[in-house]
Amino acid sequence: MSATYHVAGMTCGGCARSVELAIRQAVPSLEAVSVDLETGTVTVIGAADPIVIADAVDDAGFAFGGHAA
């Protein structure tokens, strides 16, 4: 199971690493977390509650934008 979400405010590799780390810490059971700076999205593979993902992104200082179409 995978899901892709919009994340606003990521501008560099450091931002991407911060978002990835925050999500991995919030949901350690995920198989993978992949950030795409160009599209401003993060894809998670594995079962995760979107609310937990949103909280992790927000806590890292970025804006969670919901599911990407």
Image (spheres, grey):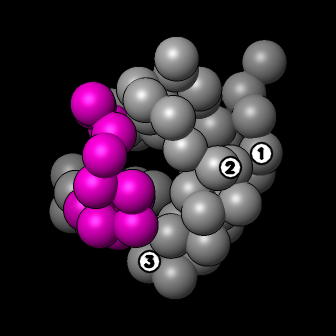
Q: What segment is highlighted magenta in the picture?
A: 20-33
Mark 2 or 3: the one toward you: 2
Q: Quadrant of residue 14?
A: bottom left
Residue 66, numbered label: 1
Vertical comparison of 63 with 16: above or below? below
User: Which one is in front, 24 or 60?
Assistant: 24
Image spot of residue 18 (x, y percent): 28, 66
Mark 1 or 2: the one toward you: 2
Q: Quadrant of the C terminus?
A: top right
Horizontal side, residue 57 vs residue 27: left or right: right
Whether residue 5 is visible here, answered yes or no, is: yes
Horizontal side, residue 46 vs residue 65: left or right: left
Q: Quadrant of residue 21?
A: bottom left
* Residue 21 is one of the magenta-drawn residues: yes
Vertical comparison of 7 with 38: above or below? below
Residue 60, numbered label: 3
Give the residue drawn at x 57%, y 57%.
53
Q: Secondary structure at mark 1?
A: strand
Tell me whether the residue at label 1 lies in contact with that at label 2, contact meaning CB atoms closer than 8 angstroms: yes
Crowd class of label 3 (few under 14; some 14 to 19; many from 20; radius 10 Å): some
Q: Amino acid at mark 1?
A: Gly
Horizontal side, residue 19 vs residue 49: left or right: left
Residue identified by numbered label 2: 50
Image spot of residue 60 (x, y percent): 44, 77
